[in-house]
Image (tube, helix red, strand yellow):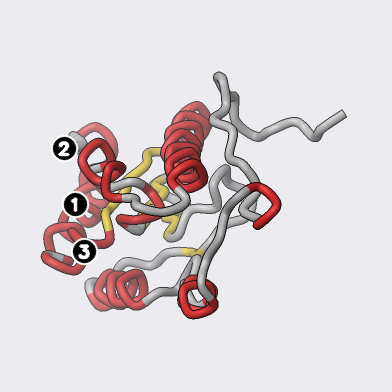
Amino acid sequence: MPPERAYPTRETVQVPRFSEDNGFYTTEARSAMMARIKGRDNRTEMAFRKLLWALGCRYRLQVKQLPGRPDIVFRNARLAVFVDGDFWHGHDWEERKNDFKSNRSFWIPKIERNIQRDREVDQALQALGWQVMRFWESDLKKSPLDAARSVLEFLEYGAHGFRAG
């Protein structure tokens, strides 16, 4: 019997295994490039964390006890912050999913499952009494101060004075 999930699921998007046996192919150069992609502590996330720290915010990183292991956690305020990569988490997904030229039958379900998992994690955290903020990597690159202001506003006024956009 599979282990119970920390968050409820509806019908889960099935992602096929990426292997030549399943008809998926990739070049060595592409494979090497994909292997270098970090799941945490990337430049954008590090810059955002440094900005928050400089503004006096004190936080914890990657708290394993919380669903989804948020990137930044403010325990006292019960705020979980995620920095979502545009590609992996499906930024502008309805427009971008048509851009895939190869291995479409792998990548489209893969990204859609990531989007579905993000929603499940948000619901699980909210059910535990946590507030969730998600920032797109591209938005943090453009205007990190706007995102930092959102966090500061929440920390200052709490859930009662904060309205997610």
Q: Quadrant of the N terminus?
A: top right
Q: Is residue 34 left or right of residue 21?
A: left
**SS at badge 2:** loop
Density class for disc 3 (Cα within 10 Å; few <14, some 14-19, many ≥20) is: some
| Residue 20 sits in quarter | bottom right
- Measured Cα–Cα span from mark 3 to mark 2: 15 Å
Q: How many marks?
A: 3
- Measured Cα–Cα span from mark 1 to mark 3: 12 Å
Q: Give the residue number, with chain letter if any, for mark 2.
A: 165
| Label at residue 140 | 3
- Closer to us: 17 or 7: 17
If you read the primary sequence from the N terminus, does the residue marked by circle 1 or circle 3 appear first? 3
| Residue 25 sits in quarter | bottom right
- Closer to us: 89 or 23: 23
Q: Give the residue number, with chain letter if any, for mark 1.
A: 150
Mark 3 near mark 2, Cβ–Cβ under 8 Å?
Answer: no
Kind of residue indicated by mark 1: Ser
**SS at badge 3:** helix
Q: Of all residues shown, which one is farthest toward the top?
A: 10
